[in-house]
Image (spheres, rainbow, N blue to C red):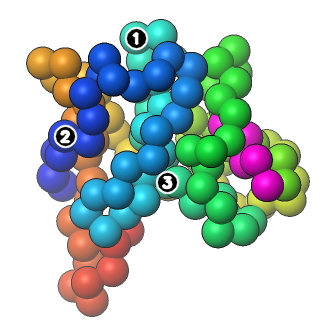
Amino acid sequence: MTGIIVASFKDLPDGGATRVDVGGRRLSVIRIDQSVYVIGDRCTHADVSLSEGEVDVDTCHIECWKHGSSFSLVTGEPDAFPATRPVPVYEAHVLNGDVVVTLPEPTEDGANV
């Protein structure tokens, strides 16, 4: 596993999501107060960017703007149809003002997990 800087914490909108492309992955970086979450940016129902959706700061969910599926920022699990599969969740923390995300190494066949 590799830690990669994906953003400056101070540049992230509080209560909002920012799309970042890194390591062959499309990520959504979400800031809520002093916490940061990183999930896969593709809705599992349709190939739509979750970063364009609305963040619910009270429940730590993000809603897909296209069809209304909502995903937990903690587990990646959907809690509203039409999505039924979770999005990937990545370990992230703030270090010296930067958001560092831990990405798994690509598999032997070159696929990103």
Whether residue 49 is situated above or below residue 59 in the rendered picture: below
Q: Measuring 64% from the left and 68% from the top, which residue is drawn there?
A: 47
Left or right: 102 in relation to 78? left
Q: Disc 2 marks which residue? A: 5
Q: At numbered mark 1, what does the secondary structure look like: helix, strand or loop?
A: loop
| Residue type, label 3 | Gly
Q: Disc 1 marks which residue? A: 34
Q: At numbered mark 3, what does the secondary structure look like: helix, strand or loop?
A: strand
- Asked if residue 74 shows in the view, the reply is no
- Quadrant for the C terminus in the image: bottom left
Pointer 3 local density, CA inside 10 Å: few below 14, some 14–19, many at least 20:
many
| Residue type, label 1 | Gln
Pointer 2 local density, CA inside 10 Å: few below 14, some 14–19, many at least 20:
some
Whether residue 11 is situated above or below residue 43 in the rendered picture: above
Q: Which residues are magenta?
A: 62-66
Name the one closer to the observer, 19 or 82: 19
Residue 95 image-quadrant placement = top left
- Asked if residue 41 shows in the view, the reply is yes
Q: Disc 2, disc 3: CB below 8 Å?
A: no
Marked residue nearer the N-terminal end (2 or 1): 2
Q: Measuring 79% from the left and 55% from the top, which residue is drawn there?
A: 66
Q: Measuring 34% from the left and 39% from the top, which residue is drawn there?
A: 91
Marked residue nearer the N-terminal end (2 or 3): 2
> x, y (%) of residue 51?
56, 44
| Residue type, label 2 | Ile
- Quadrant for the N terminus in the image: bottom left
Q: Disc 2, disc 1: CB below 8 Å?
A: no
Name the one closer to the observer, 57 or 89: 57
